[in-house]
Image (tube, rainbow, N blue to C red):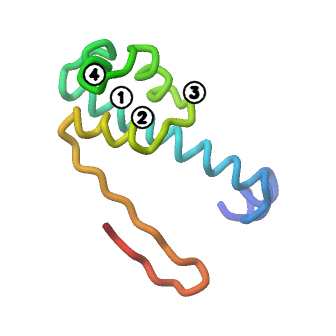
Amino acid sequence: MDEIMDKHIGPIGTPKRDAFEEELRLDLLGKAIKEARLQRNLTQQQLGELVGVQKAQISKLENSLTDARFDTVMKVFKALNAKVSFSVELLNQGVQLVR
């Protein structure tokens, strides 16, 4: 898989690869928001009201059409009563921090 990614998108660390990986992360984030919203039986309008943003902003988040502010994303997950966790890996040391 790495060879295919390197060939078609570019090697790790190149601007094209970095942009692709960022877009992929945003897509996964949008899908997680939508899935959680649907499991809570909320409309985009209802979630927007809970967060304090317009329905259009929720739609943009779910469809990865915007670079959302971190605090907005956290407000969305808080409104969904969802636990958020992420990990940070220091690439040059192989140490992984989990929060």
Q: CA distance from mark 2 to mark 1?
A: 5 Å
Residue at 39% from the left image edge and 75% from the top image edge: 97
Q: Which residue is mark 2?
A: 31
Q: Position of residue 61 (x, y in %)?
A: 46, 29
- Mark 4 vs mark 1, foreground winner is 4
Name the element at disc 4. helix
Q: Would you say the residues marked 2 and 1 are in contact, meaning their CB atoms lie under 8 Å apart?
A: yes
Q: Residues within 10 Å of mark 3 (few under 14, many from 20)?
A: some
Q: Which residue is mark 1?
A: 34
Mark nearer the N terminus (3 vs 4): 4
Identify whether 73 is placed above or below 38. Answer: below
Q: Which residue is mark 4?
A: 47
Name the element at disc 3. loop
Say which mark, if any, is on residue 87.
none
Mark nearer the N terminus (4 vs 1): 1
Say which mark, if any, is on residue 65.
3
Kind of residue indicated by mark 2:
Lys
Q: CA distance from mark 4 to mark 1?
A: 10 Å
What residue occupies the far bottom of the structure in this picture?
A: 93
Name the element at disc 2. helix
Q: CA distance from mark 3 to mark 4?
A: 17 Å
Q: Is residue 80 left or right of residue 16?
A: left
- Mark 3 vs mark 2, foreground winner is 3
Kind of residue indicated by mark 3:
Leu
Q: Is residue 92 left or right of residue 43?
A: right
Instruction: Answer with the quarter of the image where residue 39 lies.
Output: top left
